[in-house]
Amino acid sequence: MEQDNQNTTLGKIITKCGDGGMTNLVYKDVHKSDLIIDCIGTIDESNASIGVARYNLNEVLTEFNPVLDKVQSNLFDLSADLICGTDRVNEQYIQAIEDSAKEINRTLMPLTSFVLPKGPSSSIHLARTIVRRAERLFWAYHKNCKENDLHETNKNPGIYLNRLSDLLFILCRYVSEKLGDEEEMWVRIK
C-alpha cells in the first residue's frame, strides 16, 4: 500500500508488490512466511476480532468504547512498531491497559476456576485467543531475532498483548455478569 505524503489519504491499494511472496518492512524486505509477518497479520486479525466482538455486544460494552477505541488504535501502533522498527508501544500503553483491567475486575466476583468460553461473551473469548496467538508469535519472533543477531524489538509489544488478553478475559466475565449469563466453570474430570 502506497501512502501519498502530500495529504493523509491512502494512494494505491492494489500495488502488486507482494505478488512474488515478498513484502517490505521499513528496514528490510522479508518473505511473507516470515515470523514477523505472521505476527503482524495476527495482530490485524486480533484487531478485527475485537471489532466483531464490539459489534456483537455493542449495547453491553458501550461504557468501554473509549478503552476499546484506544486498544484498537494501539494495535495499529504495535504493528507499525514491528514494520518500522520503532518503539511507540511503551510502558504507558501497558500501564493504561493494566489500569483498565484492574478497574473492571474489581467489580467482578472472585474467580475460583477456569471459565468455559461460551455464551454471549464467546466472541470476546475468540478475540482473546487470537490476541494470545499474536503474543506467542511475537515472542517467537523476538527469540529468533535474539538468537540470530537480527534487528531486535523491545519486549513491550509482547507485554502489551499479554495484558490485552487479560483485559479481554475480564471483559468476557463482565459481559456474562451484566447479561445474567452464569459463567460455567471448568471442572476437572477425574
Image: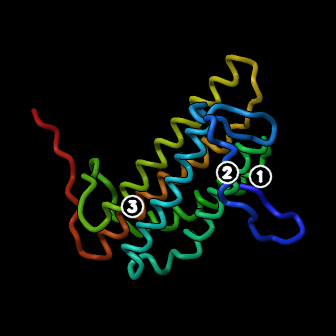
**Residue 127 figure quarter:** bottom left
Q: What residue does disc 1 label?
A: 88
Q: Amino acid under label 3?
A: Ile
Q: How far apart are marks 1 and 2 (CA)?
A: 7 Å
Task: Please state the horizontal and vertical placement of residue 131, each as a whole percent of the image.
Answer: 49, 49
Residue 94's place in the image compared with 28, above or below, is: below
Q: Amino acid under label 2?
A: Leu
**Label pair 1/2, CB-CB below 8 angstroms:** yes
Task: Please state the horizontal and vertical placement of residue 142, each as a whole percent of the image.
Answer: 65, 30
Q: What residue does disc 2 label?
A: 78
Q: Quadrant of the N terminus?
A: bottom right
Q: Which of marks 3 and 2 is nearer the N terminus?
A: 2
Q: What residue does disc 3 label?
A: 124
Q: Seen from this angle, which residue lies furthest left? A: 190
**Label pair 3/1, CB-CB below 8 angstroms:** no
Q: Nearer the viewer, residue 67 or 123?
A: 123
Q: Distance between the residues labelled 3 and 1?
A: 26 Å
Q: At numbered mark 2, what does the secondary structure look like: helix, strand or loop?
A: helix
Q: Viewed as shown, does residue 85 lie left or right of 44?
A: right
Q: Amino acid under label 1?
A: Arg
Crowd around label 1: few <14 · some 14–19 · many ≥20 (10 Å): some
Crowd around label 3: few <14 · some 14–19 · many ≥20 (10 Å): many
Q: Distance between the residues labelled 3 and 2?
A: 20 Å
Task: Please state the horizontal and vertical placement of residue 124, each as a whole percent of the image.
Answer: 39, 61
**Residue 19 figure quarter:** top right
Q: Earlier in the sequence, mark 1 or mark 2?
A: 2
